[in-house]
Amino acid sequence: MARNKIKFTSGVVFIALLIGANVLLLLPQKYTARVNYFFVKITSPIVNLIPRSNPSKNDTVKKSEYDKLLVQYKNLQADLEVIIEKNRILSGIRQKLPKPGPAIVIANVSKITLEGQLNELIISKGSDDGLKKGQYVLSTEPDPETGLAGSVIGTISELSKTMSRVKLVTDANHNIKVEIWRDGSDLGISGIMWGNNKIQANILKLQANIPLIVRKQYDIRVDDSVYAKRKFGFLETPLVVGQIIAIKPDDQDPLLWDITITPVVDIRALTDVAIVIIDMDTTSDEEGE
Amino acid sequence: MRWIPFIIVLAVFMLVASSSVLDFISFGDYNIKPELMLIVMVFFAINCETSEAMACSFAIGLAADISSSSMVMGPHTVSFGIIGTAISFLRGQVIMKRLIFQAICIFVSGLLAGTMAEAMIYRKLSGQTLNSFAVIVMTTLYSALIGPLIWLGLKAIFNMLVIEPPHYARQTDR
């Protein structure tokens, strides 16, 4: 006897698929984001094979200069080996102290998203490595002014066990308390800085214009540095975020300055980042950003 | 429709969409680039039979959600599914053979699907919006301009996925 074949009408198929899609939409973000993290994890080795930006003339050097730089690089690498060994010994000592200071976790950048009004990173460390929402993320590239690594580039916005999303300081949904410094000292001026996602795609350096509004009565100048303010449980000392490149009175409130800041690092070129972990017991509820 | 080759093709498009390949053709302060998944969805919605077009649209929407930067599951699945289904029903009324009509179809579909998806992302992420309407319009316009060219490549792939060649419209469903 021939088997009866069940045939669904187009309407039934559509309603079934729509219900399925809505169930997916209604599932909590913390569960569904795992699928996205898994996709980034499995595709990042292939996706990262493609360079993130076009090499420009400024990125190339002559052969003679290249050879000289290569020698310097090898010397520095040898020095680095020695420092790593010293650090290994020192970290062993620090573990024996009753209250450890801030820890730094280094993570690889799996994906950089700079599109539309979204400026984010996906990094290869998650809650299993002690990361929590709101923790500050630093660049591992050296600051061109101070030569020190560690300018603030964003904060952790979402986590899975093995991966995290970092909202960059240039993201329109990100804001951070900052203060203005000049010649290595705090001017006592603080304000809220938020991103506006402006990117000039044709050049390597990310030109992020971040308006910062502070009271007009203060003396602020171009080239002053902008530091992320101390935040209990998240940041013990102020850290540099960027440099002021333009100042003008705010269009809507004449009592305020509208300040444009540029980050000190080229976010497109990031391969590794460092996450500051102050207190392992800090809860994400304290985070108000 | 041969579904396993379709899934493989979709996986390749997901990889391209999530990589920085499209950054090379991006422009403007907001790094505007074409939405590859939208172009693929409209192509399949126009060229497949109604029931297959529905399944393809939902599947492409799901792929767009998995590979999207917003990392929110559901918005594109719902919006692409609804818009793709609507296109598959409308294709009997409009011939899509001319490039201008293809571009208009991508533009209108992208505008509707993009706005729906952003609204759902806004709701799911408790007020965090990703793109303003101006960015959606620019992205959709760019997709509409470049879409018909990508369709030329998709036609060759489509022939491997189905038995019939692409017919653009006014074909009776079996």
Image (tube, helix red, strand yellow):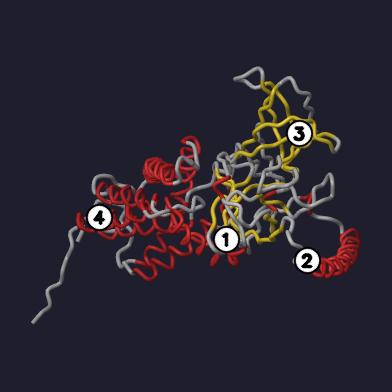
Label 3 amino acid?
Ile
Q: Amino acid at mark 1?
A: Ser
| Residue at the disc numbered 2 | A91
Q: Which residue is mark 3?
A: A180
Q: Residue at x 44, y 55 (%)?
A: B64
Q: Which residue is mark 4?
A: A14
The residues bearing labels 4 and 1 have C-alpha atoms spaced at a distance of: 39 Å
In this rendering, the count of numbered labels is: 4
Secondary structure beneath dot 3 equals strand
Q: Is residue A203 above or below residue B14?
A: above
Instruction: Compare marks 4 and 3 and give the one earlier in the sequence.
Output: 4
Q: What chain is tagged by disc 1? A: A
Q: Nearer the viewer, mark 1 or mark 3?
A: 1
Sooner in the amino-acid sequence: mark 4 or mark 1: 4
Report the residue that reaches farthest toward the left.
Answer: A1
Q: Amino acid at mark 2?
A: Ser
- Number of the label disc, if any, that sits on residue B74: none
Q: CA distance from mark 2 to mark 4?
A: 59 Å
Q: Are marks 1 and 2 in contact (CB under 8 Å)?
A: no
* Residue, disc 1: A127
